[in-house]
Every structure is written in structure tokens, then in C-alpha cells.
Amino acid sequence: MECDKCQKVGKPLNVGQPRQCIKVKMDSQLKVGFIGAGNMAFGIAKGILPGDVLPEHVTVSAPSSKNLERFQELGVEVTHSNEDVVCGSDVVFVAVKPLLVPLVLTEICQHVTNKHVIVSVAAGVTLATLEELLPENSSVIRLMPNLPCVVQEGALLFARGTHAKPEDCALLRSLLQHCGLVEEGPEAWIDIHTGLSGSGVAFVYLFAEALAEGAVKMGMPSALAQSIASQTVLGAGRLLRDSGKHPAQLRSEVCTPGGTTIHGLHALERGGVRASVMSAVESATERAREFGQQPAAGSVVFRTIKTDDF
């Protein structure tokens, strides 16, 4: 049954047809919505547009017009109404900050039907919480992307909810295929992936920054050092991905007895870089888990919402 709001914005795709019809095939008629206009939403939106989804079939909502400007440059539709996004979409990405998820889902739940696939990218918000706040039997998927989706080199991990069907997951895979590596796993891995890859991108940037600053200290111009550092990270990452070798094996292949690399690695080990990186992943993972322990539904006390929260 359609809600009044859905009737006002137009008949949703495939209403009256079996739910599977929009899942088994990715085509240009698929309509995708984003609630929230932050970096994660932008990364996914930019990643999916090279595929079969037409820009005019993508709608993004946020309370601030400023946050929507870069989406308009992609040619997609923008709005300040979360309800319009839901009623005009088949797949809805909930891409707001974790503390705002209960508020947003409470707002849109009356418009969610069995035709929708709801995909949450909010760190730490569990499938159980999402399913509690949405209508019974809703198809819910929890996804953790990372920022390199913007350049179609992301690493994305998703976990399916109780009522998400295989065809829902197949649709999501197809939709995200241009964003980068897409994998499915148990929900327990999502928070780990947040620390490893979602936050891990920033850890890599810090390392690249330190590489460049080390070169500047030794006399290289800053711009050149940054350019070489970024290419070094890119090349090392591609070699690691494409070779299939363990990082330790590749590292040992660079080292020669008494050479520059082993001396540099000794300095890194002496500085505790290995333990620091492991601790960083652990800390980010634990923080994601803390988000999942926040009270849900009616017990949430909402703070004042700022326009940059979406």
C-alpha cells in the first residue's frame, strides 16, 4: 500500500509487481536516494554514477543547501525533504551521523514499503537498531564504505539484515561495483572494517604526510615530496593488491642486507609504528562499537541538530 506522500510525488517504481523485479537487474530505471549529504554520501553517489544509474534518478536530501551544492554539480536531484527521497527511490542510503539515525528513521518509517532497500552507512548503528526503527520485514543492509569511492577505488563491506533477500544484496553489489572492492560479511566485521578502512584512509594520509615531511627535512621541495609520497603510496597499494603477496613478503623483497630500507624500517620499529597502527585500528573499532551501544528509538535524547550533521 502506498502512503499519501508517495502518491503525491508519483507512483513508485514497480508498485504492484513482485518485489524481486527491481532486484534481479540493474538498469537505468533504478532510483537511488541519499538522506544526508556528507562525504560518505558524496563518495558513493560519485561512485555509482559511472554505472547504469542516471543522474536524474538520484535524489539527495539535506537541511542545508550549502551541503547540496557539490551534488548539484553531479547533475542529481536535491531536496530538503527526507520523505521525498524515500517516496521517490528504490534504494535509500541513510548517510547521516549515527546519533541522528533514530530521528531520521522515525521520520521516514511510515513511507518505507516492501519495495525499498534501506542501506545504512552510519558507523556503529546495528542492524537490530535499524530493524527496530523501521516497519516489520523491511529490507535493511548495513554498509561501511570509505572515501576513495569518490575515485572508484573504495573498499566497501556490507552485512544483510534479517529480511534482506539475496536479490537485495545482488542489487547492492551491482550498484556499487564501480565504487571499488565490495565484499559481504557478518555484521561483527563492519565495525572492524570501520577501523581498518573507513578510518584507515586517514591513517594512510598521515603516513604519506610523514613521508613527505621526512623528505622536506632532508632538503626536497615540499610540492615534489608530496607528489612522490602520494605516488609511492599508490604504487605500493596497487602492487600489494595485484600481487596477492603478504605485506611482509613484499617488504622483505625491498630490503637488502645493510641497505637503506632495513635501516629505515629499524627506525620505524624503534618508534613503535607497528603497535601504533594496530592501536589506531583498535581504537577506531571500539569507537564504532560505542556508537552501536547508544540508546535507540524513544529513549534517545536528541541534541540540537546542526545543518552540517547531514
Image (cartoon, rainbow, N blue to C red):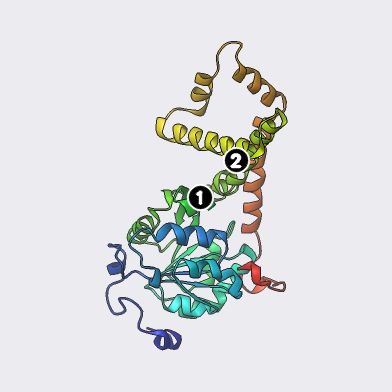
Return the residue found at the far top.
257
What label does residue 148 carry, if any? 1
Category of crowding for the residue at label 1, using alpha-carbon neighbours closer than 10 angstroms: few (below 14), some (14–19), many (at least 20): many
Picture quarter containing residue 283?
Answer: top right
Question: Where's the N terminus, which quadrant?
Answer: bottom left
Choose between 137 and 37: the one closer to the eye: 37
The answer to whether residue 190 is left or right of residue 212 is left
Category of crowding for the residue at label 2, using alpha-carbon neighbours closer than 10 angstroms: few (below 14), some (14–19), many (at least 20): some
Q: Residue at x 46, y 53 (%)?
A: 158
As drawn, 302 above or below 10: above
Q: Give the structural element (helix, strand or loop) at label 2.
A: helix
Choose between 142 and 94: the one closer to the eye: 94
Question: Quick check: can you spot residue 12?
Answer: yes
Contact flag, marks 2 and 1 (Cβ < 8 Å): no
Choose between 236 and 197: the one closer to the eye: 236
The answer to whether residue 293 is left or right of residue 254 is right
Q: Residue at x 50, y 38 (%)?
A: 234
The answer to whether residue 282 is left or right of residue 55 is right
Question: How many numbered circles does the render carry?
Answer: 2
What label does residue 204 carry, if any? 2
Question: Quick check: can you spot residue 278?
Answer: no
Q: Residue at x 64, y 67 (%)?
A: 309
The answer to whether residue 280 is left or right of residue 112 is right
Percent of width and height locating residue 96 = 58, 66
Percent of width and height locating residue 63 = 60, 76
What label does residue 196 carry, if any? none
Percent of width and height locating residue 232 = 54, 33
Query: Looking at the picture, which amino acid does disc 1 mark?
Result: Pro
Q: Give the structural element (helix, strand or loop) at label 1.
A: helix
